[in-house]
Image (spheres, grey):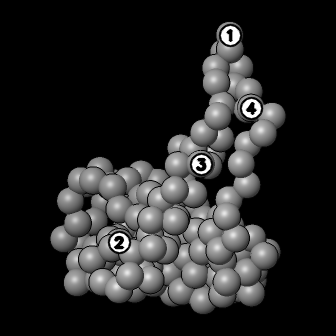
Amino acid sequence: MSKKVITAIAGLSLTAGLLGFAGVPAGAKADGGQTTALAATPKPPKGARAVVQVSPNPTTKRGQEVTITGHCGGGKGLKAVIAGIDRERPVLENIRIIDDNPKRFVAKATLRPTIGNGVGPVFVNCGGEAGVVLLVTHV
């Protein structure tokens, strides 16, 4: 794996941590059942501003079709979807970009038939901006 790919993965992981889990900002706290964010939530760094979601998430069947949606955060449009870090055993296969619109992209893919229970990253490349989401599998 090249240094550039490792640096991109580390940057996206940092961004995911800054953004928090399930869309809740990392600085959010619960007060009496209400979630409030800190006033100065950091903005993701340039190059990691694309937003991506996978549905359904978690997945529950091998071979299940999932939909990948989001926006490019200033990028030129959806260029690629990469599912997993290991190219020989990706989380998703048969990835198809349906609409590459930078304001609302859509892609479809299927969960590999050999996948087990766990978590795998799904990365998007938006031509200058990237994003990542974790796909949970319960098969």
Nearest to N terminus: mark 4 or mark 3: 3
* Front residue of this view, candidates 49 and 2: 2
Q: Indicate which label's residue lies in the foreground, 1 or 3.
A: 3
Q: Quadrant of the C terminus?
A: bottom left
The answer to the question of whether label 4 and label 1 lie on touching residues, with beta carbons closer than 8 A, is no
Residue at the image point whose x is 78% and y is 39% from the top: 40
* Distance (Cα) linking label 1 and label 3: 24 Å
Nearest to N terminus: mark 1 or mark 3: 3
Residue situated furthest front in the rendering: 3
* Distance (Cα) linking label 4 and label 1: 16 Å
Q: Which residue matches tag 1?
A: 32
Q: Secondary structure at mark 1?
A: loop
Q: Secondary structure at mark 2?
A: loop
* Distance (Cα) linking label 4 and label 3: 12 Å
Q: Secondary structure at mark 4?
A: loop
Q: Secondary structure at mark 3?
A: helix
Residue at the image point whose x is 53% and y is 49% from the top: 17
